[in-house]
Image: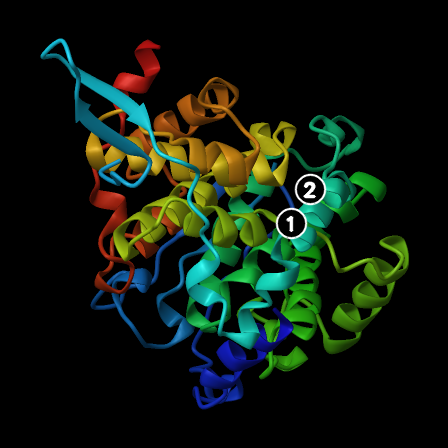
Amino acid sequence: MDGVKMVRGMEQIQRRALSSIDQNITGALLRHSGSVNKREYRGKDEVCNKKSGSLDDIEIADVEESEDDNDVTVIDGTDGMDVEMEAPITDIDCSDSNDPLAVVEYVDDIYAYYKKTELSSCVSPNYMVRQFDINEKMRAILIDWLIEVHYKFELMEETLFLTVNLIDRFLERCTVIRKKLQLVGMTAMLLACKYEEVSVPIVEDFVLISDKAYTRKDVLDMEKLMVNTLQFNMSVPTPYVFMRGFLKAVHSEEKLDFLSFFLVELCMVEYETLKFQPSLLAAAAIYTAQCSLWQIRTWTKTSERHTKYTEEQLLECSKLMVTYHQKAGSGKLKGVHRKYSSYKFGYAAKTEPALFLLDL
C-alpha cells in the first residue's frame, strides 16, 4: 500500500513551488482577545471554486474567545410471488489479484490491524474541559481554516486527516493558550506533510499563511514539543484508511466518493464527533452518502461484512451527518461546503441531504 501512496505522491510532485505563493496575505487565524470574527478577502471567486490561485483567496479567521444489485437477486417464486434472496457476499479484491500494488494477499490482515489499533488514534470526547483558554468553537474555526489551506497547498487527502488527528491528540495532552492554537494547527500540518507527502511545504510557507504571526523558530520549537508529546507516534489509522477500503466494498463511483468525503470532512470540524471511532465515521459517511444519492436506505451484506457495522450501529452517527449536511452552507464555517461545491469535487455539497433518516 505504501507503493500506491508513492505513485500518487509522485503525480503531484510537479505542482508549483509553494514558496512562490502570492505573499499578499493579510490577517491571521488567531488573535489575542475577545470574540470570533472573520475577514473575507475580495477575490473574483471563492477559494474552493477555483482549481488554482493564490492564498489571497483563503478566508482567514480571527479567534478571540443501492443502486448496486450485486448483493440481491430476485427470482420468481413457485406461488407466483417475487421472492428476494441474498446472493453470496462479494469478493471485492478479486479484480486486483494481478496488481502487486494492491497487496491482495494482505488486505484482510491490514484492515484487521487497523481495527485492532484504531483506539490508539482516538481521543477523549470531552478533553476540551481541561483547556482553560480555548474551546470547541476555536477548534472548529482552526480546522475549517486548515481544510482551505490544505486545498490550496494541493496536498493529499490523507495529510488532512492526519493533521486533525495530531491536533486533537496534542490538545488532549497539553494545555494551549489561544494565541498559540494556530501555531499548533500549522505545525500539525507540517508534521503530517513530512509523514505523507513527497513534496513537502517549507516552514516559511506556514509562516507566510499565518501573516508572520509566528517565526520560523516558533514553528520548529512547537514541532519538537509535539513530536515529543506524541512520542513520535504518527502511524495511526484515521478515517481515511477505512474510507478507501469501505468505498471499494460498496462498488463506489466518483459521485459517491466525493459525497462520502464531504460528509466525513464536515465531521472533522465538529467536536462532538470525537466520540465515534474512525472506522465508524467512515462507514457512516458512506451509508449516509448512499442514502442521500438514492433517497433510500441501502446497506448490503457485503458492506456489513467489510465494515463490521450493521445499519443500526451507524444510525446515530448518520443522523448527525445529515444535520451537518443540512446546515453546511449556512453559518460562518463554510470551508468544507465551498470546497465540495466546486467542479473538481463534483458539486457534492449541492446533493440533497437524506432527511428521511432523521425520522428513524
Q: Tell me where residue 182 appears, x and y as whole percent.
A: 64, 55
Indicate whether 183 appears above or below 309.
below
Q: Is residue 288 visible?
A: yes
Residue bearing the label numbered 1: 111
Question: Which residue lies most toward the left here?
Answer: 80
Q: How far across and how far down the image is residue 116, in percent? A: 75, 41
Q: How is the image coloured?
A: rainbow
Name the spot of residue 283 as percent of width and height, x first.
49, 37
Question: Quick check: 177 above or below 204?
Answer: above
Q: Residue at x 69, y 48 (%)?
A: 114
Tell me the quarter of the picture where residue 14 sits: bottom left
Tags 1 and 2 in contact by the CB under 8 Å rule? Answer: yes
In the image, taking residue 232 as reference, residue 1 lies left or right, namely: left
- The type of residue carrying mark 2 is Lys
Question: Which quadrant of the figure has residue 212?
Answer: bottom right
At 67% from the left and 49% from the top, the residue drawn is 165
Q: Name the residue type under label 1.
A: Tyr
CA distance separating discs 1 and 2: 6 Å
Element at label 2: helix
Give the residue drawn at x 42%, y 82%.
22
From where the camera sits, is residue 62 visible? Answer: no
Camera-side residue: 276 or 51? Answer: 276
Label annotation for residue 115? 2
In the image shown, does 72 or 298 lie closer to the viewer?
72
In the image, is 153 to the left or to the right of 212? left
In this view, the residue in front, 171 or 179, is 171
